[in-house]
Amino acid sequence: MAAREQARHWEHPGLPGVDLLRARYVWHTFTRHAHDGYVIAAVTSGVEGIGLPDGATRAGPGDVVLINPETPHTAYAGAEEGWSYRVLYPAPEVVAAVAAETSSLRGTPWFNASVLDDPATAGMIADVHRAAEHDNALAADTFLRMVVARLLARHGSSPAAPGRAAGGGPGAAARARDLLAARLTDPPSLEQLAAEVGTTPFALLRAFKNAYGLPPHAWLTGARVRTARRLLEQGVTPADTAATVGFTDQPHLNRHFTRIVGVPPGAYQRERKNVQDPPPAAP
């Protein structure tokens, strides 16, 4: 029997600032991208391959994967059978609040490990999911805070100082990023972008990738998908969302959105609608 892929990307109203993903992937590959917040994943079966800035690694059953905000990465099947996992995507302010209450870390904490052999913590991540799936907001919030506090105590640190971008400097990279963010639907060419920030195309490429881990065109795709998520959450149709964020059509949105988020735009929006419009209580 052929292996089947399945995924649910959703949120629970009792866990504000946290997205949840439960999935099994066999052929799906996440293109290189970055998140505004953290990735905290527990692999439950198979093998996940993860491409990180410092190289590729793998995670199997009982392993926990930690990825810090704005860290470019890919994910793909590390074995023929693919992989299954449960993922928490807490916003930076969620993790920072736990850190402020339970540790001496301040600001946006950093995890100093990427893959942990830690079945106990993996089980706690699964507990968050199971509680949310059973609509037990108190338990889900409790387990979430416990697992984040545990990880911060064992693997938390202050963020490393950003490296200096070569060829154009971090200032040019930041100005280019801001220009792209302001022009999602009509971005300049690389030559125009470099001219607007006062450098050359190849110097800007080096500076941008050093600062953000991605070339400008890939960062722009990620920014479009992030904006698309917000629009879908507000009820904008996928077709209108595609046009608003600068994709040529809805299939173009579907392709990039699925490669980064792990589910198609329509499935993502349906889960948000289910949270915003819960079924009426039984009499």
Image (cartoon, grey):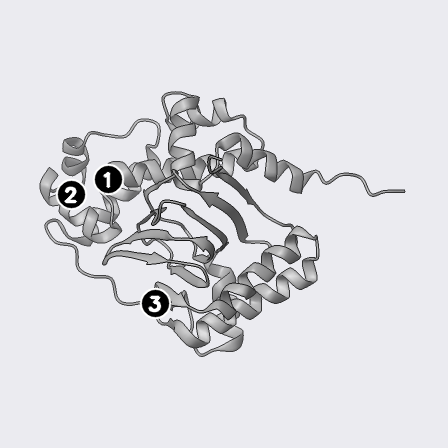
Give x and y (percent) for residue 9. Answer: 53, 43
Q: Which residue is mark 2?
A: 205
Residue 6, relative to residue 266: is it above or below? Answer: below
Q: Are marks 3 and 1 in contact (CB under 8 Å)?
A: no
Give x and y (percent) for residue 251. Answer: 41, 23
Give x and y (percent) for residue 164. Answer: 17, 59
Q: Which residue is mark 3?
A: 113
Residue 17, relative to residue 7: is it above or below? Answer: below
Residue 223, relative to residue 247: is it above or below? Answer: below
32 relative position to 62: left or right: left
Mark toward the viewer: 3 or 2: 3
214 relative position to 6: left or right: left
The quadrant where residue 176 appears: top left
Where disc 2 sits, the SS reads helix
- Packing grade of label 3 (10 A; few <14, some 14-19, many >=20) is some
Q: Which residue is mark 1?
A: 216
Q: Are marks 2 and 1 in contact (CB under 8 Å)?
A: yes
Tell me which numbered mark, 2 or 1, is placed earlier along the sequence: 2
Q: Residue at x 45, y 69 (%)?
A: 118
Instruction: Decide if residue 12 is in sight here.
Output: yes
- Amino acid bearing label 3: Ala
Q: Residue at x 54, y 53 (%)?
A: 18
